Image (spheres, grey):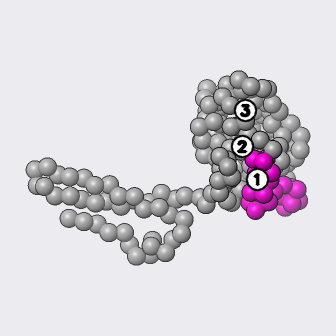
Amino acid sequence: MSFSLPQCFNAMPYWLVFSIRIVMFLRQTTITIPYLIEVENMVKVEDYEVPENLYYHKEYLWAKVEDGKVKIGMTDFAQKQLHDIVYVELPGAGDVITQNEPFGTLESVKAVSDLIAPISGTVETVNEELESKPELLNEDSYGEGWLLIVAPTNLDADLKEILNFDAAVEWHKELAKEG
């Protein structure tokens, strides 16, 4: 018995198809079950990941616009420069953050650093898992290691002040040259 992926998925550029093969020993039958995982386009600059669909602040944070809200996190470059992150202090829900102003701190084995807001707005959600697992910033800085979700107050103007994907790739190339 074999299942196949519908033809409509073959044209989708941002999907990877994986198969699971299950061998039923009693019947000696192999079943192949495809499943999909959505993958963001990403560029690697040296050893640093730069995903598409994000905006980048030169204070090493990213911003992703989702349903009128903005998810904020730390760049791969920053987490690799800081090494093991051991503590994160973030604002609470309802707090207001201002673009280019500190809103929290993080501590690594290497340094204590301010977190500088890429956009302005009101904090709606804080990734509370970081309190007990700050290492998520090192393990998955673009996924489970996100910092905040913010209701932006001046999104269009704020986004003009930070880097789009193409500009971020060029910036990461400069950072990689500097070491």
Residue position for label 1: 173
Q: Amino acid at mark 2?
A: Phe
Q: Secondary structure at mark 1?
A: helix
Q: Do we see residue 68 in this rendering?
A: no
- Give the Cα distance between marks 2 and 1: 11 Å
Q: Which residues lie in the magenta part?
A: 155-177
Please identify the quadrant where the C terminus is shown: top right
Q: Secondary structure at mark 3?
A: helix
Residue position for label 3: 82
Q: Camera-side residue: 116 or 78? A: 78
Q: Amino acid at mark 3?
A: Leu
Q: Would residue 121 appear left or right of 14 to someone viewing this image?
A: right
Residue 89: x, y in percent? 75, 29
Q: Nearer the viewer, mark 2 or mark 1?
A: 1
Q: Would residue 171 appear left or right of 141 to someone viewing this image?
A: right
Q: Nearer the viewer, mark 3 or mark 1?
A: 1
Q: Do we see residue 142 in this rendering?
A: yes
Q: Camera-side residue: 104 or 96? A: 104
Could you tell me which residue is drawn at 67 percent across and 59 percent down?
Answer: 52
- Give the Cα distance between marks 3 and 1: 18 Å
Residue position for label 2: 77
Question: Mark 3 vs mark 2: which is more N-terminal?
Answer: 2
